[in-house]
Amino acid sequence: MRMVFDPTEADGLRATARDAALEDPTLAYVLLDLAEHGVDLNDCRTWDDIKAERGIEAAPAADSEQRVA
């Protein structure tokens, strides 16, 4: 499954990429790629998957603390 942007949204991403190109070419490339191809949702990973891959353990929440994603 692929999420794509409507033409107005894609044009907005391209405009932002043009504005960011000199300061952050990597960001500009990512925005242009998103505008052109969208996001392949089959390749997405959850934060839990990434934490498990990298061996990151979640610290326990304090009694008064509420953890949100």
Image (cartoon, rainbow, N blue to C red):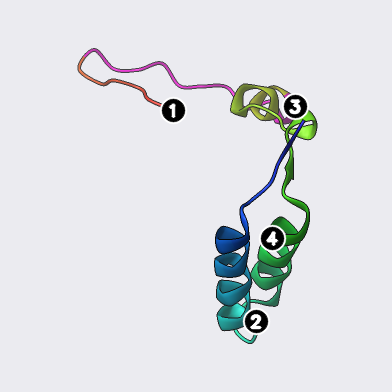
- Residue placed most toward the observer, 21 or 34: 34
Comparing labels 1 and 3, the label whose residue is closer to the camera: 1
Query: How far apart are the alpha carbons under marks 2 and 1?
Result: 31 Å
Label 2 crowd bin: few (<14), some (14–19), many (20+), radius 10 Å:
some
Residue 35's disc number: 4
Query: How far apart are the alpha carbons under marks 1 and 3?
Result: 18 Å
Amino acid tagged 3 = Glu
Residue ID at (68%, 46%): 4
Amino acid tagged 4 = Ala
Tell me the SS state at disc 1: loop
Residue 19's disc number: none
Q: Mark 3 points at which residue?
A: 53
Residue ID at (63%, 51%): 5
Q: Give the range drawn in magenta.
A: 53-63
Mark 2 or mark 1, earlier in chain = 2
Comparing labels 2 and 4, the label whose residue is closer to the camera: 4
Q: Specify whether residue 56 is painted magenta.
A: yes
Q: Mark 2 points at which residue?
A: 21
Assign the magenta stretch its main secondary structure: loop
Vertical comparison of 8 with 18: above or below: above
Comparing labels 4 and 1, the label whose residue is closer to the camera: 4
Query: How far apart are the alpha carbons under marks 3 and 4?
Result: 29 Å
Q: Residue 68: where, in percent of width, then height?
A: 37, 25
Label 4 crowd bin: few (<14), some (14–19), many (20+), radius 10 Å:
many
Comparing labels 2 and 1, the label whose residue is closer to the camera: 2
Query: How far apart are the alpha carbons under marks 2 and 4?
Result: 15 Å
